Image (tube, rainbow, N blue to C red):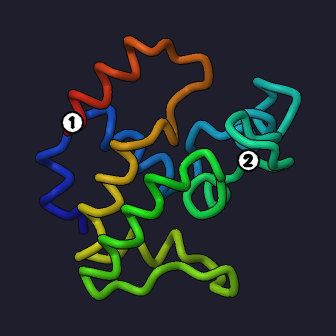
Amino acid sequence: KIEKALFSIRKLLAKRFFQLKLGHAITAQYLNRIGKIRSKACWWCPHSNQTISHLLFECRHWTPQRRIFYKELAKADIEIPIMAEIDPKDRLFNHKKGLQLILNFLAATEIGLRPGTDNLKITRARQADR
């Protein structure tokens, strides 16, 4: 069942949400797997493997946005992801109350956008996603 909130958001943000949820987002690991790039390394921090989980929960580049996201999760009485949790992405992406919070976090970051996307496109995408 698709949440009604997803029908009211912009196409680019919805696309990023579903790509991340389904595991087919633009990450170094995914692009490496399909033969588009050679390295799996994160292009925003020195981490050696840029996965969806890394971008959502670990990448140092997105720490300020993640702090806001985690504060909002706590306000909504949703458990903050911990390293010992097997797959926090699935729990959060399927949590009814957490949906808008995930969308806000994605809109505040470039997670799921192609590397090298020029600043004008990023700015327009962020404005359209809000």
Picture coordinates of residue 72 (x, y %)?
A: 30, 71
Picture coordinates of residue 57 (x, y %)?
A: 59, 63
Name the secondary structure under disc 2: loop
Q: Residue at x 73, y 42 (%)?
A: 45
Does residue 121 sit above or below 31 in this rendering? above
Give the residue number, with chain letter if any, for mark 1. 10
Residue 120, picture quadrant: top left
Residue 16, picture quadrant: top left
In this rendered view, identify the residue nearer to me: 84 or 61. Answer: 61
Q: Residue at x 49, y 72 (%)?
A: 90
In this rendered view, identify the residue nearer to me: 46 or 21. Answer: 46
Horizontally, residue 14 falls left or right of residue 79, namely left
Picture coordinates of residue 36 (x, y %)?
A: 76, 24
Q: Are marks 1 and 2 in contact (CB under 8 Å)?
A: no
Q: Disc 1 vs disc 2: which is toward the camera?
A: 2
Q: Quick one: label 1, few (<14), some, or many (20+) residues within 10 Å?
A: some
Q: How many marks?
A: 2
Disc 2 residue type (three-letter): Gln
> How far apart, in angstroms, are the residues tagged by discs 1 and 2?
26 Å
In this rendered view, identify the residue nearer to me: 59 or 8. Answer: 59
Does residue 116 sit above or below 8 in this rendering? above
Q: Residue at x 65, y 61 (%)?
A: 58
Q: Quick one: label 2, few (<14), some, or many (20+) residues within 10 Å?
A: many
Horizontally, residue 64 falls left or right of residue 128, namely right
Q: Quadrant of the N terminus?
A: bottom left
Give the residue number, with chain letter if any, for mark 2. 50
Q: Quadrant of the C terminus?
A: top left
Picture coordinates of residue 37 (x, y %)?
A: 80, 25
Disc 1 residue type (three-letter): Arg
The earlier-in-sequence mark between 1 and 2 is: 1
Q: Residue at x 45, y 64 (%)?
A: 67
Name the secondary structure under disc 1: loop
